[in-house]
Image: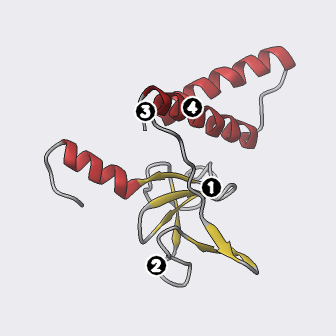
Amino acid sequence: MKHVYEAEKYAGRLCDLIEHEHGQRPTPDEWQRAVQLIHRILINVSLRQKGQAMTTETIKHEPHDSDAWVCLCGNRPDLHGFYPCDKTGTYVEPTLAAWQIPRYVCDRCGRIINQSTLAVEESALVEQKEQAQATGGTKP
């Protein structure tokens, strides 16, 4: 989650620079894309420092229905479903104020999915397990 905060910080600075140079701020969609790209760069650099390669998980959808998502865990809308969430996987009402970046959480495995790209941004359950193991706790 550290990288998400840093990406938002750098994207904010980038937006300020663009506004200064061009006289207008990027749109929310442009800002979101900048955050995603910077986030991926930060993760990639971090993984390279650790000697690991970056892979991007992406969910799929049914061949003839782009709204019928299929998560990597096998979940579909007619099974456990997908629900609007924030960047931590916490359920939110899909209002403009609470849901500025359209993300969904898989209600089966906890993967956080970007609606625009179908990329898996984070996995809330994986992070919870890692935190529990780091603190000597049990899995959620």
**Three-letter amino acid code at the position of disc 3:** Lys
The residue pinned by badge 4 equals: 8
Sooner in the amino-acid sequence: mark 3 or mark 1: 3
Looking at the rendered structure, the secondary structure element under dot 3 is helix
The residue pinned by badge 1 equals: 102
Relative to 38, is 80 on the left or the right? left
Relative to 95, is 72 on the left or the right? left
Distance (Cα) linking label 4 and label 1: 16 Å
Residue sitting nearer the eye, 92 or 32:
32
Distance (Cα) linking label 2 and label 1: 19 Å
Quarter of the image for the N terminus: give it.
top left
The residue pinned by badge 2 equals: 80
Distance (Cα) linking label 3 and label 1: 20 Å
Give the percent coordinates (x, y) of residue 64: 76, 81
Q: Quadrant of residue 25?
A: top right
Quarter of the image for the C terminus: give it.
bottom left
Distance (Cα) linking label 4 and label 3: 10 Å
Eye-nearest disc, 4 or 3 = 3
Looking at the rendered structure, the secondary structure element under dot 4 is helix
